Image (cartoon, rainbow, N blue to C red):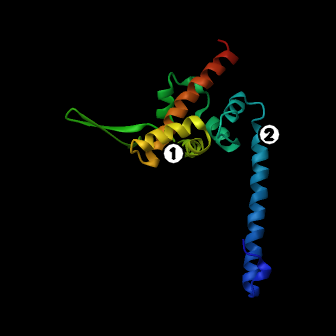
Amino acid sequence: MLDPKSTSSPTLQFLLREHYDTVEYFTKKIATVTEQMQAEVADDAVVKQLLRQPGIGVITAITMRALIGRFDRFRTGKQLAYFCAVCPRNHSSGGKTKMGGLIKAGDDLLRQVLIEAAHRLTRYNAEWKAMSARLQANGKKKCVVVAAVANRWIRKLFYQMTSSESSANPA
């Protein structure tokens, strides 16, 4: 980072101080909003369980909770993955099937959050890092690998969340 005092131009010094002040202001603002969000969901069992997942932070957990709601409203992990828009599209014609890109249905914000989570998982979690390495060794592009991790992770998460939701909320 440049030191505003090391520059000779007073205008440049002023602009740098303004930028530093802006960054500091928004850093504090983000911290305040994050604290408020944490306070709002302090007693939410789903958010607590999401926060125990590797690579999931407060913003990701709250976003998933807001957009997914209850995990047990889906019958399968595959249904949840479709809802989250992290499933591959299927192009079928004349007996040939080709996969291409992710489905367009689903919530864009939820897909973005899960893709970001998958990026973290492929870097910092041994299980998903190994899956990523296997797929890349088979010639898959990084974006395809991350989408596949997001798909598998949300399906696995579905079973973890629904088994705990059903045990916490007996019918």
Q: Position of residue 137 (x, y in %)?
A: 43, 43
* Above or below: residue 168 compared with residue 22: above
Give the farthest residue toward the top. Answer: 171
Q: Residue at x 62, y 25 (%)?
A: 161
Image quadrant occupied by the C terminus: top right
Tell me the number on the disc at residue 108.
Answer: 1
Q: Identify the element where label 1 is drawn.
A: helix
Query: Which quadrant would residue 63 be assigned to in this image?
Result: top right
As displayed, is residue 108 above or below residue 151?
Answer: below
- Relative placement, left or right, of 140 versus 163 is left
The structure residue drawn at horizontal position 51% and vertical position 41%, both measured from the top left corner, is 107
Q: Nearer the viewer, residue 165 or 51?
A: 51
User: Which residue in the protein does label 2 denote?
Assistant: 39
Q: Is residue 116 left or right of residue 19?
A: left
| Number of other residues with Cα within 10 Å of mark 1, as a class: few under 14, some 14 to 19, many 20 or more | few
Quadrant assignment, res 46: top right
Q: Report which quarter residue 92 is drawn in.
A: top left
The secondary element bearing badge 2 is classed as helix
For the question of whether residue 4 can be seen, the reply is yes
Residue 12 point in image, percent of width and height: 72, 82
Residue at 46% over, 33% down: 82
> Mark 2 belongs to which amino acid?
Ala
- Quadrant location of the N terminus in the rendered image: bottom right
Q: Is residue 20 above or below residue 14?
A: above
Q: Residues within 10 Å of mark 2 (few under 14, many from 20)?
A: few
Residue 117 image offset from top left, x and y in percent = 59, 43
The amino acid type found where label 1 is placed reads Asp
